[in-house]
Amino acid sequence: MQNKMGNMPVGRLILNMAWPAMLSMMILALYNIVDSFFVARIGEEALAAITYIFPVQMVMMSCAIGTGVGINSLISRRLGARKIEEANLAASHGYRLSFFNWAGFALVGIFLSRPIMEVMTDTPFILDEGTKYMTIVLIGSLFVFVQVTSEKIIQATGNMIFPMFCSILGAITNIVLDPLLIFGIGPFPEMGVTGAAVSTVTGQLFSMILGQYLLFGKKHPVKVSLRGFKWQGSIVRDIYAVGFPAILMQCIGSVMQFGMNMILNSFTETAVAVMGVYGRLQSFIFMPVFGLNQGVLPILGFNYGAKNKKRLMETYKKGFIFAFSIMAAGLIVFQLFPHEILSAFNAQGSQDMYDIGVPALRAVSWCFLPASYGIMTSSVFQGTGHGFLSLWSSLIRQLVGVLPIAYILGKLYGLNAVWWSFPLAEILGTTYLVIAFVWLYKKDISKLEE
């Protein structure tokens, strides 16, 4: 039986593969926004608390998603080359790695949550609430690590529907529990910011439970072995040849977020709260594109393994067109309706939130268009096993670009200028990506068989 990733028309295949992941990521973005929406009802300090924690959550998710990307890429390439047993070994190794990764973050949650918060703020309410939130989320991260790995294994086989169900279940659980636990509705206790953390972890638990049933209770082209398993260092290296750069890429984003919080805090903590709102809002634009990336990655990996240059390049080009269209729509919304968007997170009607937030959303959203090229080009690097090319892109954009530019603009022109660091950094990143892709095409892709 022919695999659809090798013979279905590419445009239809991308839509077929991507829409479940895009829907899942949209729902994920929605419940991130819902978290902020309800927490903002407590006050700006509560919103600032979860914003300070966001970089730590990004590191955790970086490890989970980056490892999953490495697993997905390796499995899809092995399936494309018809090496089924090697694909099974990749899945079995990846599943076990999720438990090792969780253990490290659980220890951080137990011992380092308060010291990390003390680095970022000395406001008592933010410090106490942020510490409790971080501790709960990191100790409960087992559910995230196991679930993300399970989803990536299933996605690598071309099945995007099952992971969608898991994401929907987790998101709905979180959305329902958020107001109940934050405000103490009915028989539920009023837990404030801590309630948001408990809601998040509970949603992740439900998602993981369903994921395990789908991974082990249904038939797939690859199997995870629970018995008779022996570690092979070469497989772990192959996973992290793509996974480690993907982790670092995400972690660089965390470092950037941490640094940006420090720059903004030198002006006012309201600016930090605005950054938190933007982070949630922009995820509603970026998450569908990341879902598109999840659908495109197995197609790229499969056809690279099958040495089919034509389908690989067609997938890349059409994926970019879809991504650019989504980002362009997001840019229009941010340019036309920034005040209306911010009003959902400004329960106290703070004029400072509008004065800072409206120009911020309009400035930062100009990064959307070049980011679409960056995400799709990075997919090619990851799908072909050249993950470090993506890593350099993140380094250039977020460390070489955003933070130094933001610091300089802030010193020279004030807070409103800081936000323009994002689109300026994307221009730097796009320049690098064009050069890197041309190099990869000449060195590798052009030599594949048609």
Image (tube, grey):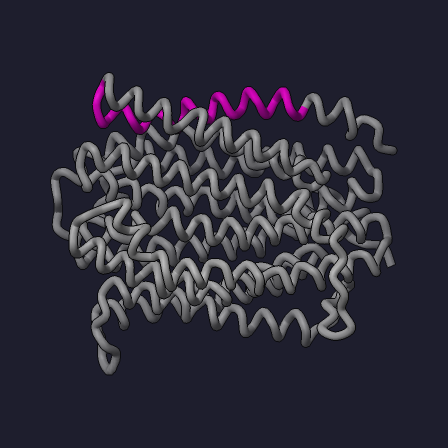
Front in this rendered view, residue 332 or 167 = 167
- Extreme residue toward the top, this view: 412
How many numbered circles are shown?
A: 0
- Please indicate whether residue 286 sits to the left or right of residue 127 in the image: right
The picture quadrant where one finds residue 125 is: bottom left
Q: Is residue 258 above or below residue 444?
A: below
Front in this rendered view, residue 115 or 201 = 115
Position of the N terminus by quadrant: bottom right
Tell me which residue sits at (27%, 71%) in the image: 181
Tell me which residue sits at (57%, 65%) in the image: 99
Tell me which residue sits at (55%, 32%) in the image: 374
- Please indicate whether residue 326 sits to the left or right of residue 79 in the image: left
Q: Which residues are magenta?
A: 413-437
The picture quadrant where one finds residue 189 is: bottom left
Majority SS type along the magenta span: helix
Q: Is residue 8 visible?
A: no
Front in this rendered view, residue 358 or 116 = 116
Q: Is residue 329 visible?
A: yes
Report x, y in % for residue 177.
33, 70
Position of the C terminus by quadrant: top right
Is 431 included in the stretch rendered in magenta? yes
- Please indicate whether residue 179 sits to the left or right of residue 391 in the image: left
Report x, y in % for residue 174.
38, 66
